[in-house]
Amino acid sequence: MKRLTLAGLLAVPTAAQNWNPTNPDVTGAISFGGAFALGPGGRAVGFANFGTGGTRPAFWDGAGSHELPILAGDDEGLAVEINASGTSVGISVDYVNQGTLTYIYEHPVVWIGGQAIDLRTQVTGGDPLELLSCSGIDAQGRVIGRARKLPAGSTGLRGFLFDNGIVTDLGDLNPSGFAGTDANAFGAHGEIVGASTAPTSFTHAMLWKAGAMTDLHDFAQMPGRNSHAYAINANGVIVGSGDFGADFLDFETGAMWKNGVITDLGSLAPGQIWAQAFAFGINLQEQVVGATNLPNGEARAFLWQSGVMSDLSTKLAPGSGWILTSAEDIDDEGRIVGQGLFQGSLMPFLLLPNCDGTYTALPGGCMGSGALTPQLAGVGCPGAGWNAALRVTNGASGSFGVLLFGTGSGALPITPSCALGIAPLLGNPVIPFALQGSGAGGGEHAFVFSIAAGSSAFDVWTQAAVIDAGAPDLVAATNPLLVHVQ
């Protein structure tokens, strides 16, 4: 992944970065609620009260609020994640009163087509675990969550992976002692991030991949004792929280793990010893969202990008009626969900980026391996103050290439059989890259770029050329892409 800064011709001043807030409960069906995750088309899942008693799993779409069923005999529940196919996962809860005590029993649920399925009934083999709750689902329908090892009481709570009926215990960072693991989120390439008990008996952020767990807590960069990983983007950048102070107070602020470097994202109460922040979501463009507190202690949703944390409520138009308290997820289009106070009531929110910038895919490109033409597309908002991305896909994995820029759509032959469509060509920047993935058509790469706040509107043409042994004349090229920044 490369990061670049786009600057261009001075023209019309662009607007400041902001979002349009919406209350997805368009029909007024709930008295309170909150959203945890975004799915296809801006669909969101979370929890709500529909007036039938207790908190229920919920999803929201353009038609408003919808209650998801809990398991038979249970009392409450919540949905925490949704995949690209619209399948959701979460928790169904049974409260059992025995005298003066109330026992809470969690059960793992998958919702397919609006029907609740007890994940325990789908287990056909694997490690001996009692599944308790679900925390994530990937595009292949694999599920992660929390479990208890059998026989009960033999160890702490376990993170599990459910794949086509088979349950895998993810293990922990302290296999020789009493330990526990939380699996919080899937990555795009099968990785799982979360937290696990370390040999120090404190909790460390972890990455699980291909059966191996890696401790992400580096005391040289994070001197405190605890850390947690909550999300990972398509480029493998991880966010969460960690204790960056060697004061033994265990307060955590936002954290990012990228290429071996841990960054303290800070909080919105700098200088306060009790300040905390938790990063819950990150998109391809490395826009990070989460929850923190203000100097007066009030909870606020935050947006972090390019080294700066902002109160997300300040990104809304004045008089919106919202105080955003926690942002839970952000997708590659810049949409954000969470919960906040709307006219005094806790409600789910969906923020839509207010963006006038555009991407236009132009005809052209040169065929590569497998008779496939690589593709170039824009992701996110190409506007002043925003992070956005350019993504190369459909290429030959392992191939090397360059991303080029031009000021028009003229033809520029580069081999007898291949011409670029972005002439006149700019000499700078020229960005080298390597396509990651496997096989013909499986190679991809993303370039994250920042557009300075206050930039004027401009147009730039861009295209990638790739060295490809399976292409005529050994060179393939993507389609040209017109990026209009505004």
Image (cartoon, grey):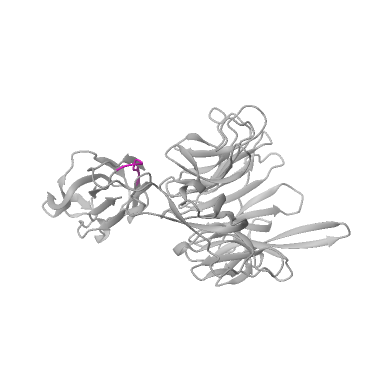
Residue 445 in sight in this render:
no
Q: Is residue 21 left or right of residue 402?
A: right
Q: Is residue 367 left or right of residue 129?
A: left
Q: Is residue 26 above or below residue 234?
A: below
Hey, which residue is sitting farthest right in the picture? 99
Magenta stretch: give its range.
Answer: 447-455
Q: Which of 395 and 133 is in front in this view?
A: 133
Residue 307 in sight in this render:
yes
- Residue at image point 20% right, 60% down: 363
Q: Which of 454 and 234 is in front in this view?
A: 454
- Residue at image point 59% right, 57% down: 343
Label tally: 0
Q: In this view, does 86 lie to the left or right of 378?
A: right
Instruction: Tell me where residue 64 appears, x and y as whole percent.
Output: 53, 69
Residue 176 picture quarter: top right
Instruction: Tell me where residue 382 appears, x and y as whole percent.
Output: 33, 50
Q: In which quarter of the image is the N terminus?
A: top left
Residue 267 picture quarter: top right
Instruction: Tell me where residue 386 appears, x and y as whole percent.
Output: 38, 46
Residue 370 picture quarter: bottom left
- Residue at image point 56% right, 64% down: 88
Instruction: Tell me where residue 414 appears, x and y as whole percent.
Output: 14, 48
